[in-house]
Image (tube, rainbow, N blue to C red):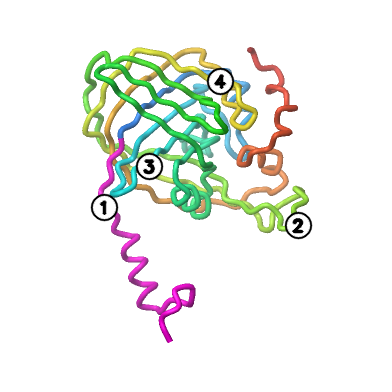
Amino acid sequence: MARVRYGARSEAEITAARAAAATLPEIWSTGVVAVWETDPDVIAAVLPPPLKPTEQPLVRVNISQVDLPGHPLGAGSVAVAAAHGEQQGWYPLVMPMTTERALIGGREVFGEPKKLGEVSVERDGMVVRASLARHGIAFVEVRGAVSGPLPLPEPAEKLDFYFKCLPSVDGSGSGFDADPVLVHCVRHERFRTLERLTGDVVLRESMYDPVADLPVRKLVELTIGEKTSDQKGRVVERVSAQALLPYLHQRYDDARQILDGPPQGSVR
């Protein structure tokens, strides 16, 4: 009988697949990063426990074109500064990806809030435009001009927080099939180019990706650069299903979200 590819793999095939996954080639990306201060109460409103706000209410947008062999990938992230105990990092609210493979791997393995979307990074001489779009709405757009080179930073470690969970199979929206877990994902980043941008960040209303609730009060950083990174994750604790449930809508498109008001007490 010919080999049935959906059949069980042999131990040797499983071992070979694991070895290949553990030795990925160095992959570079060209990305625009914008960091700004927003309203502290908005940051507090979007963080599920046990995450807490940091001293500075920061939002970070990363919009990148990843130079994957044979199939370029557009990858984006909108994250807020957060702390878990003594450790500070970023809590992504949405991570648009242009390919299904990148989306599924990140969601199933790490619990990343990835969604299919459109990611664009365009540079024409000194002029740069980058955007994240879904459902025909460019909900984040960064526009700027290169204003000069920046010193290359030393290789650095970046920490992201994810919640890995499975909504209950009965579809009632009343819970999870197992206790959710909090994941610490550590990335080691290294740059080969970095330039300062002078420009602005535009947030557009979207009922699917309501990042417009994170207004730009003060732009802290705006850059374009080429970097490479790796990532490793680990489960650090199980979290309360009931405490996480009110935030579950962050991960999914729900048209009824248009009925939600802005965070109580926020300044618009």
Mark nearer the N terminus (1 vs 3): 1
Q: CA distance from mark 2 to mark 1?
A: 41 Å
- Residue at x-position 50% and y-position 52%: 104
- Please state which amino acid type lies under the numbered disc 1: Pro
Q: CA distance from mark 3 to mark 2?
A: 34 Å
Q: Which residue is mark 3?
A: 73
Mark 3 and mark 2 in contact? Answer it, CB < 8 Å. Answer: no
Q: Nearer the viewer, residue 35 or 6?
A: 6
Q: Secondary structure at mark 2?
A: loop
The mark lying in front, picked from 1 and 3, is: 3
Q: Which residue is mark 2?
A: 170
Q: Is residue 199 left or right of residue 193?
A: right
| Quarter of image, res 18 | bottom left
Q: CA distance from mark 4 to mark 1?
A: 36 Å
For residue 14: magenta?
Answer: yes
Q: x%, y% of residue 156? A: 31, 37
Q: Is residue 262 left or right of residue 33?
A: right
Mark nearer the N terminus (3 vs 2): 3
Q: In the current view of this chain or complex, which residue is farthest to the bottom?
A: 1
Q: CA distance from mark 2 to mark 4?
A: 35 Å
The mark lying in front, picked from 2 and 4, is: 4
Q: Secondary structure at mark 1?
A: loop
Q: Which residue is mark 1?
A: 25
Q: Which residue is mark 4?
A: 204
Please tell me how crowded label 1 is: few (under 14), some (14-19), or many (20+) other residues with Cα within 10 Å.
Answer: few
For residue 149: magenta?
Answer: no
Please tell me how crowded label 2 is: few (under 14), some (14-19), or many (20+) other residues with Cα within 10 Å.
Answer: few
Q: Secondary structure at mark 3?
A: strand
- Residues in magenta? 1-29
Mark nearer the N terminus (2 vs 4): 2
